[in-house]
């Protein structure tokens, strides 16, 4: 029917990338739903009765969350890619191409507690979260139609999240998201040309300089890259090359959880507020090609430069596609490194 024209993927021939048209979600209650102010404040309770992510509560569309006690994963009720995406699409004109937006979109709650964030989870809870991310990647990536699993957390109202219940999203798509696709291609080219893993060369350059390393332990490292585009852009990576979380052993998972926690605690301590960011797992595509040169890492793109000052993307970034940064990575990294690694809220009570 007419839904065929509202939900599909369209090829952008100039950027060589897919655009997901999910106009059927326009009137979804999901994004329009707001949680009362009490839920957004620092002293929000552990359980909020009208939060659609809290245990046992009804979600939009009528389904009800289990009364979960740990990590909880469910299929997004208003997916942007899904098994029911229309397949009978209207063919576009001329050079244009479209295809079904099939795949799977899921939501993963970090905790049954409404009032915690990634930075407030204990290291062993973050470790279990890493295992959950790994298992989702394995399960979704194994589906024949899925070429990539994008796992990301949008945190904070400035990135459009009205519900503070700690959660991330998974988009298992039939295409590889552009940033990952670029990284995968560049990593393969570097490996072929030099025999080395590009990310290892990056880590080596960071170590030689040292000024942008925020934290490291025996197998994981958190740093602000030399080429950071956002004021507080940081990466967390294992020291050994693994193309995804699948390659991690138990000790590496523990170290990685420790490094991840160390960084996000510093983020919160920076302005003594819940620090907004877009966090993305950079895992290799699951498209069946060899990604041995791909080095798993997590990227943080925090939108704020100062407590209430957003980095606006404008002419250079949106218009031109390159970033103009007003801050120096070396001094911003120093700022983060000089902060305590104990969460400020622990001393509030
Ligand atoms: Zn909640
Ligand atoms: Zn990356």
Image: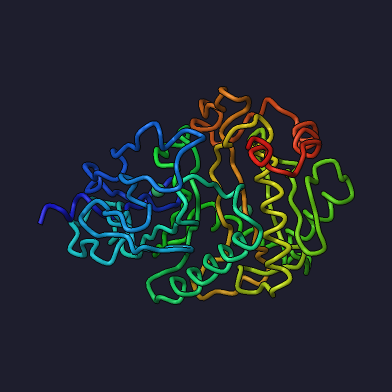
Q: Is residue 82 found left or right of 164 in the rendered image?
A: left
Of 306 and 122, which appears nearest the observer? Answer: 122
* Image location (x, y in percent) of residue 70: 48, 63
Q: Quadrant of the N terminus?
A: bottom left
* Point 31% across, 64% down: residue: 102
* Point 26% across, 54% down: residue: 58
Instruction: Classify 218 as above or below 246.
Output: above
Check the image and name the residue furthest to the front: 349
* Image location (x, y in percent) of residue 279: 56, 48
Residue 97 visible in this rendered orientation of the protein: no
Q: Is residue 163 found left or right of 313 in the rendered image?
A: left
Q: Is residue 99 found left or right of 262 in the rendered image?
A: left
Q: Quadrant of the C terminus?
A: top right
* Image location (x, y in percent) of residue 78: 28, 53
* Point 51% across, 26% down: residue: 314
Q: Is residue 290 found left or right of 48 in the rendered image?
A: right
Check the image and name the residue furthest to the top: 309
* Image location (x, y in percent) of residue 200: 78, 60
Q: Quadrant of residue 56?
A: bottom left
Residue 126 visible in this rendered orientation of the protein: yes
Of 177 and 255, which appears nearest the observer? Answer: 255
């Amino acid at each position: 029917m007419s839904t065929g024209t509202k939900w599909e993927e369209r090829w952008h021939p100039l950027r060589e990338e897919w655009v997901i048209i999910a106009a059927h979600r326009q009137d979804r209650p999901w994004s329009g739903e707001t949680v009362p102010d009490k839920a957004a404040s620092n002293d929000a309770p552990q359980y909020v009765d009208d939060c659609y992510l809290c245990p046992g509560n009804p979600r939009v569309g009528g389904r009800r969350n289990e009364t979960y006690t740990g990590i909880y994963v469910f299929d997004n009720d208003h997916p942007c890619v899904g098994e029911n995406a229309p397949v009978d699409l209207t063919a576009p004109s001329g050079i244009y191409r479209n295809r079904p937006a099939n795949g799977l979109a899921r939501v993963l709650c970090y905790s049954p507690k409404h009032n915690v964030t990634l930075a407030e989870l204990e290291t062993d809870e973050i470790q279990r979260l890493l295992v959950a991310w790994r298992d989702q990647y394995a399960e979704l990536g194994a589906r024949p139609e899925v070429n990539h699993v994008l796992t990301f957390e949008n945190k904070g109202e400035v990135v459009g999240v009205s519900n503070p219940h700690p959660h991330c999203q998974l988009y298992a798509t039939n295409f590889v998201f552009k940033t990952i696709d670029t990284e995968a291609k560049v990593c393969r080219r570097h490996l072929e040309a030099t025999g080395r893993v590009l990310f290892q060369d990056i880590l080596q350059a960071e170590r030689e300089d040292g000024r942008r390393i925020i934290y490291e332990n025996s197998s994981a490292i958190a740093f602000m890259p030399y080429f950071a585009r956002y004021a507080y852009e940081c990466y967390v990576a294992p020291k050994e090359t693994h193309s995804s979380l699948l390659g991690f052993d138990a000790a590496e998972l523990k170290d990685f959880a420790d490094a991840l926690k160390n960084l996000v605690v510093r983020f919160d301590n920076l302005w003594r507020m819940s620090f907004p960011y877009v966090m993305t797992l950079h895992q290799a595509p699951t498209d069946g090609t060899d990604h041995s040169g791909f080095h798993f890492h997590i990227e943080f793109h925090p939108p704020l430069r100062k407590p209430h000052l957003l980095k606006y993307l404008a002419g250079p970034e949106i218009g031109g596609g390159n970033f103009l940064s007003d801050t120096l990575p070396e001094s911003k990294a120093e700022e983060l490194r000089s902060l305590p690694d104990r969460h400020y809220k622990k001393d509030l009570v």
